[in-house]
Amino acid sequence: MPENRSFDLAVAGGGLAGLSLAIQIAGQGYSVIVFEKDHYPVHKVCGEYISMESWNFLHDLGIDLSSMNLPRIKKIQISSPSGKSLEHKMPLGGFGISRYLLDQTLAQLATNAGALVMTNTRVNDIQFNDGSFTIQTSAGDFSASLAAGCFGKRSNIDVKWKRTFIQKKPDRLNNFVGVKYHIETDFPGDSIALHHFKDGYCGLVKIENGLYNLCYLTRATNLLTHGNIADMERNVLMRNPFLKKIFSSSRFVTQSPVTISQISFAKKEQVEKHLLMIGDAAGMITPLCGNGMSMAFHASKILAEQMTRCLQGQINRKEMEDIYTRQWRKLFSPRLRMGRAIQKILIGERMSGILIGICRAFPFLLDPLIRRTHGNPF
């Protein structure tokens, strides 16, 4: 347990956004503490694909991606529930890497930079009073001048604070279930696949060590109808011939899937009670766009810049919050809107087949769609 319990920055959540923010702020000599409810390494529900826009940023953080022999993704394969498919070259491309490896690497870099990373520590509440934060955790109370909420898709803090998206009734933007496996299979290492099924879609991408990440998202009603994951996969996902082949011919390295429920793509606020949100806590792009990880990294960079200015006394807290909110929305709001629009179309059996048919006939339509859900290198 640390003797000092007062820090310049407290980060609630040690995922991609939280750890990369910690590395940047601690690297400038400020005191930083990170609270993570799990341990490292750990598997998380994630598409495990990063677009090339993040390559330089990760290199600057200290990750030597070039030496890690990671699969470079240059093409995408898309199929409808009936098996109608298309393949297309991706404008920017990306690479595959597991959260199991990436989060552990970032945690070590944060520690090396001087941040205190406390694992197996749950944040129970965060309160702002008299210009500073009190962070109530399972390891006791801590204080900090600044605080960031990096607690992912849905946390106990979201529920406790009754954030707007938590209170929304189930609709086309919320109440999804995510399921992930690591498998060994036969699929081109330079491609990413996006296979659709009734009320959902499944991604496949190669990661490190010859493994593939198989991750899918579906409405919770699909799971409720069939009772369990195995029956849902057999009766719904495997109606798509591509998914039937994957599930029947692959070797599942993780026999039990990693799962998450009650996923929401509804609009979120970037600042609540002076807590600055980044990553999925600030806003979540639909996984079919394959860009959530890059958004987390980019948001950490723009927040780190404004936090540094605040800690240096160049701007006050309100200016920091306002600038960050404007920058976040300018960068990411258009992507989120496009992602929601695409998901509404593709998650339907009939419409996904129609869209794939149109894109097969007019392939030039795909590049603008992909670009509008991605950004430029930062």
Image: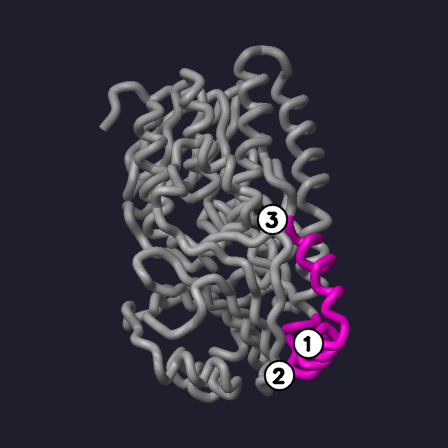
Foreground: 115 or 6?
Answer: 115
Residue at 42%, 68% in the rendered image:
214
Foreground label between 2 and 3: 2
Give amino acid for label 1: Ile
Q: Is residue 310 above or below residue 197?
A: above
Q: Residue under label 2, please give it.
A: 84
How would you rate the neighbour count of disc 1 (Cα within 10 Å): few for under 14, some for 14-19, many for 20 or more?
many
Colour scheme of the picture: one colour
Foreground label between 3 and 1: 1
Q: Residue under label 1, please give it.
A: 356
Disc 3 to disc 1: CB gap under 8 Å: no
Q: Which mark is residue 73?
A: none
Q: Which mark is residue 283?
A: 3
Which residues make up the magenta segment?
A: 345-374
Give amino acid for label 2: Lys
Q: CA distance from mark 2 to mark 3?
A: 32 Å
User: Could you tell me residue 108's position as x and y percent?
Assistant: 30, 35
